[in-house]
């Protein structure tokens, strides 16, 4: 009797222990996938403490990305004993190819067994492909491929091709995103690139669509510019779209048969079928970005496959006069470089030329699948001296990424004639005396003379010399007297003449406003600044706006800038501009600062 009671007690203790113990299971499907496809991991835990259990999925992050996680909790009672079942479903995306292991997952006090998954290349067909692809949120998945692969299986796939895998930092790299479509893919949006912190990505325009043996190929062009050196990956692209599943349902088959009985051809498949979403992702492409060469120095880094620097005058036959503005256009055309690498032109003034460069107008185009950037800078030159003068050359250092050599683009110095007063008569005469050679005709051959003849000749020479000295003294005294008289007249009349010059510049401003000559107005404003504030570096309209202490005047200068460079056609308030200039209200101790270092030497 005692033995029977002991057996029953032991059975009950074992049953209770089994009832309280947690039951854990884990499965992964499919066991073989292509790179870019998803693996579904199911984990189930059943026990009294299932409601409070939370697994640690951190170990999965080594070889997989967790795309989504869902869970459910169920409760049941058997023979008065309550049980709970907690389930988790994870969609995992492999980070690499090969034999991968889903590591053991800790769930409470229990642990799952490791699971094996084989990941094939994007273009390779697994040996045992499942019937239904696993995809997040109902998406139909598709694989990616390398550029060298040509044969693919499936209805959709995508690839990213990069033209240069060894560029320099800030060098433009051409890339093409190919999307292959066998079932009529409809794009929901433009392709999106992830993790673009190290890249500037610019689309080259609308995609090019072609057909090859019934397969549609959509090619999206991009220009990618790396922002850091070292081994980095080109961001992978994600494409979202949908297609209409042409598989007929029994309902549509029956209705189609009914129409055929009456000899009516009508396809109801597209009418009843719902769009099936598609999610495509490309494989990241590793590139090795080279840094700025050490021998390049501290100059502005400008990598390009080709570069050209030109200059031409705005007028075909410009006339140069002292104090009058003439405009010159300097154009920079560079291939294989983005607009963020184009430097702003900065020129230094000197005693002969006042030079005022404006902000460059930059544009980009694509020619023969290569990025072409063009910058045009208008420079206003105001000569300060007449005569034959030389405009200094302009140099720009750049790096030829084709030859891997440092090169220098040069606009040669240009010699021109400036109309206006050159030099005073005395300086010109002195220069002529010091530069003109001595004529041989003034030299007389030595002739032997007697003492009386010699004395007579000497006296004559002395008399002539004294006469010349007297004449020279009178000329010098007259010259000094003329200088004194000129100085007194200059002191008396200069303010009036200066006021006349300033009035002329104001009249030129008023005339330009009246006829709506915006370029002439800009030149007249800069000339007015040069005449009234010669010590200030006012080189463009932005400098002038910052110098004049008037908010209304700054608004007018903004309108003028828009009319000049942004295609604006707004009216200017002539009264505000002219009154602000006449009052000459300037900001106290305001210094005009230039935004960039001197890039041209």
Image (cartoon, rainbow, N blue to C red):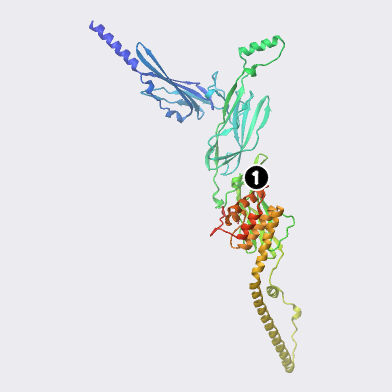
- Residue at the right extreme, as displayed: 441
- Residue 274 versus residue 484 in the image, above or below: above
Looking at the image, residue 122 lies above or below residue 419: above
**Residue 74 locus on image (x, y percent):** 42, 18
In what quadrant of the picture does the C terminus appear? bottom right
Q: Quadrant of the N terminus?
A: top left
Q: Residues within 10 Å of mark 1 (few under 14, many from 20)?
A: few
Q: Which of 296 and 411 is in front in this view?
A: 411
Count every numbered label the image shows and give the total.
1
Frontmost residue, 411 versus 323: 323
What residue is rendered at 64% in x and 30% in y? Answer: 218
Quarter-of-image position of residue 160: top right
> Where residue 398 sits: x, y (%)?
61, 50
The single residue placed furthest to the left in the displayed view is 2
Residue 237 falls in which quadrant of the image? top right
Residue at the disc numbered 1: 363
Q: For mark 1, give the secondary structure.
A: strand
Instruction: Give the answer, above or below, for where 313 lies relative to 180.
Output: below
Q: Can residue 556 be seen in this view?
A: yes
Residue 429 lies, in percent from the top left, at: 70, 75
Regarding residue 313, the answer to whether it shows in the image is: no
Q: Position of residue 506 (x, y in %)?
A: 67, 60
Q: Vertically, is 170 above or below 412?
A: above
């Amino acid at each position: 009797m005692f033995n029977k009671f002991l057996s029953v007690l032991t059975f009950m203790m074992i049953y209770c222990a089994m009832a309280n113990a947690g039951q854990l299971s884990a499965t992964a499907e499919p066991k073989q996938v292509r790179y870019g496809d998803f693996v579904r991991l199911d984990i189930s835990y059943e026990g009294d403490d299932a409601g409070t259990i939370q697994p640690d999925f951190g170990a999965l992050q080594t070889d997989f990305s967790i795309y989504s996680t869902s869970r459910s909790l169920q409760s049941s009672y058997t023979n008065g004993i309550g049980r709970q079942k907690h389930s988790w479903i994870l969609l995992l995306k492999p980070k690499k190819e090969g034999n991968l292991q889903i590591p053991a997952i800790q769930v409470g006090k229990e642990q799952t067994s490791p699971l094996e998954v084989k990941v094939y290349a994007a273009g390779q067909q697994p040996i045992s492909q499942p019937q239904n692809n696993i995809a997040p949120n109902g998406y139909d998945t598709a694989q990616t491929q390398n550029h060298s692969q040509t044969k693919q299986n499936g209805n959709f796939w995508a690839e990213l091709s990069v033209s240069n895998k060894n560029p320099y930092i800030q060098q433009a790299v051409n890339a093409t995103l190919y999307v292959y479509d066998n079932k009529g893919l409809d794009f929901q949006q433009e392709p999106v690139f992830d993790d673009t912190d190290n890249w500037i990505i610019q689309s080259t325009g609308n995609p090019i669509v072609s057909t090859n043996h019934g397969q549609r190929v959509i090619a999206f062009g991009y220009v990618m510019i790396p922002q850091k050196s070292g081994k980095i990956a080109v961001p992978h692209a994600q494409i979202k779209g949908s297609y209409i599943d042409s598989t007929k349902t029994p309902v549509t088959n029956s209705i189609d048969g009914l129409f055929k009985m009456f000899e009516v051809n009508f396809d109801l498949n597209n009418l009843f079928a719902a769009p099936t979403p598609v999610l495509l992702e490309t494989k990241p492409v590793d590139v090795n970005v080279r840094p700025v060469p050490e021998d390049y120095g501290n100059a502005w880094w400008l990598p390009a496959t080709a570069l050209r620097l030109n200059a031409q005058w705005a007028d075909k036959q410009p006339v140069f006069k002292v104090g009058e503005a003439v405009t010159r256009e300097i154009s920079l055309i560079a291939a294989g470089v983005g607009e963020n690498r184009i430097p702003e032109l900065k020129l230094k003034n000197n005693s002969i030329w006042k030079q005022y460069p404006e902000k460059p107008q930059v544009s980009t185009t694509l020619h023969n699948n290569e990025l072409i950037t063009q910058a045009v800078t208008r420079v206003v030159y105001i000569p300060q001296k007449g005569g034959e003068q030389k405009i200094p050359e302009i140099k720009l250092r750049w790096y030829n990424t084709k030859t891997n050599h440092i090169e220098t683009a040069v606009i040669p110095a240009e010699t021109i004639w400036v109309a206006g007063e050159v030099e005073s008569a005395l300086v010109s005469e002195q220069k002529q005396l010091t530069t003109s050679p001595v004529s041989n005709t003034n030299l007389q051959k030595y002739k032997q003379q007697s003492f009386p003849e010699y004395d007579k000749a000497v006296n004559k020479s002395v008399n002539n010399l004294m006469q010349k000295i007297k004449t020279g003294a009178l000329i010098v005294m007259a010259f000094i007297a003329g200088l004194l008289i000129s100085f007194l007249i200059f002191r008396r009349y200069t303010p009036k003449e200066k006021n006349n010059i300033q009035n002329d510049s104001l009249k030129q401003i008023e005339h330009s406003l009246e006829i709506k000559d915006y370029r002439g107005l800009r030149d007249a404003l800069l000339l007015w600044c040069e005449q009234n504030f010669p010590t200030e570096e006012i080189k463009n309209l932005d400098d002038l706006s910052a110098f004049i202490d008037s908010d209304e005047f700054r608004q007018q200068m903004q309108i003028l800038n828009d009319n000049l460079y942004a295609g604006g056609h707004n009216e200017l308030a002539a009264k505000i501009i002219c009154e602000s200039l006449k009052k000459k209200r300037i900001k106290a101790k305001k210094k005009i600062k230039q935004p960039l270092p001197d890039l041209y030497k």
